Amino acid sequence: MNDWPQGWTADNRDGYGRGSAAARPEGARPMRHVQRGGAPHGGPAEPPMPPGAPPRGRVPAQQSQGYDDYHDGYGDGYNTGQVYGGRGGDPYGSPRPDWGRRVKAGILTLVVVFLAASVGTYFWADSKLRREVDLGIVQDRPEAGEGTNYLIVGSDSRDGLDDEDKKRLHTGTVEGKRTDSMMILHVGDNGNTMVSLPRDSWVTIPEFTGSESGKNLPSPGANKLNASYSMDGAPLLVRTVEHNTGLKIDHYAEIGFGGFANIVDAVGGVEMDIPRDIKDKNSGADLKKGKQTLDGAQALAFVRNRYEAGSDLERTKNQQKFLSALASQTATPSTVLNPFKLYPTMGAGLDTLVVDKEMGLFDLAEMFWAMKGITSGEGKSMNMPISGSAPQGSLKWDMTKVEQLVSELRNDEKVTVTDEQ
C-alpha cells in the first residue's frame, strides 16, 4: 500500500509531484512590513499608494466609505474614516492649547481670590473696631464745615497691660485715664493740617450731658484741657474743644499706651532722627542723638517725654513727628500688600483703638493717609497758637489767631496762620 498522497512516490516527495501538471509554488520571499489597515495575513499584496494619499496608518479627514468599499474583504491600504478631535485642520488629531482662554481663566481666578480676601479682611477689621464713643450726646454742636475734622487722642490708659508690661513701658499704675496727647487733623482739598492741642491749654469747660448719668451738669469753669477728659471722657473732651474753637469734630479716635507700643512693634519699629541725647527717668527715655529705629517701648518713651523736653509745646511737636513717621511707614505697599505684616499691624491697632460710633474703616484709612501726606510735605503741622502763660502753669491761646485758623479750616482754605508767638 502506498502511504504517500496520490500522485506522490518516494522519489518525488521533495518535488511537489515532480512530473505532474501542477504548477510549482513560488519560492520563499521576505515578508514586507505590514501597515495598519493593510491586507489580512495571507492576503494579496498591498496595492501601491494612490497619488496624494496620506501615509499608511494615518486617517484622512473625510467621510467614511464603510466596510462595503473593501473588495473581497481586503482594504485598499488605508482607512478613510473621519477624524475626531482635530483642531485647525491638523490631520494628526492633536489639539493645540488655547492660551488665550487659559490666561483669561487665570486672571479671573486671581480677581475672585483678591476680592474674596479683600471682603474677608474688611469684615474682619470692621468687627475689631471699638465704636464706644457716642458723639450724639454732645450738645450745642457747631455747624459742619468743609472737609473732615478728626480729634486724635493718645491716652494714658493701661488697659490690657500686666505688671510686666507696665514695668517695661514705664507707665506705672494709676487709676482711671487721662489724655497724654490731643490733635485736630483736618482733611480737605487744599491740604491737610494737623494742629496739636497742648494738654495744659487753659480753656473753659462748658456745661455738658453726663455720658453715664445722662443728666445735664453745670460748667466746671476754666481749667486745663485734659481735665475735661478726666471728668467725663471723650464726649466732654469733644464738647470742650468745640466750645472753645467753634470747629465741629466729625470723628474721634483714641489709642492707649499698650496699643501704641504694639503697633510700633508690629511694623518692625519706626525710624526717627532724634535731635539730641534724651534721658528721662519719668518716661523711661534713654536715646542717643541721630537716626535710629525705635521699638514700641522706646517710641512710647519718646512721645511721652515731657520733663526733659522742657515744655508741653516741645513735647507735642515730637508727638506730631513720630505719629506722622508711624503713619508713613505703616501706609506702604510693603505693609499693606504683605499679609504677614498687615494683619499683625491691623490687629495690634484695632484691638486698642477706640473710635466714635459713626466711624468706619474708610474714615480710619483716610485719617492715616492724611497723616502720611503731612509727613511727605503735602500738608502742615503746627501747635495751637499760644500767647502766653495762664494759671496753674497752663498755656493761654492766642484767640485772634485761633479764630483765623478755625475760619480757614472750616472753609477748607489753605492755612496761613502760624504758631509763632
Image (cartoon, helix red, strand yellow):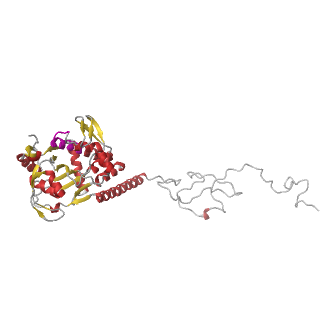
Residue, x 40% and y 52% (percent of image)? 103
Q: Magenta stretch containing residue 311, yes or no? A: yes
Seen at 7% across and 49% down, the residue is 403
Task: Out of 345 and 391, give the one closest to the viewer.
Answer: 391
Relative to 9, 110 lies left or right:
left
Side (left or right) of 347 relative to 201: right
- Residue 135 lies, in percent from the top left, at 17, 60
Residue 350: give x, y in percent of width and height: 28, 54
Camera-side residue of 261 and 408: 261
Looking at the picture, how far across and down is residue 9, in whole percent?
90, 56
The residue range painted magenta reads: 308-325
Q: Look at the image and tell me whether residue 332 can be seen.
A: no
Q: Work out whether residue 199 or residue 264 is closer to the camera in this orientation and state it.
A: 199
Quadrant of image for the C terminus: top left
Magenta segment main secondary structure: helix
Quadrant of residue 64 within the rendered picture? bottom right
Residue at the (10%, 40%) spot, across then down: 420
Residue 12 lies within the magenta run: no
Q: Residue furthest left?
A: 400
Closest to the observer, 134 or 315: 315
Q: Which quadrant holds residue 268?
A: top left
Q: How many marks?
A: 0
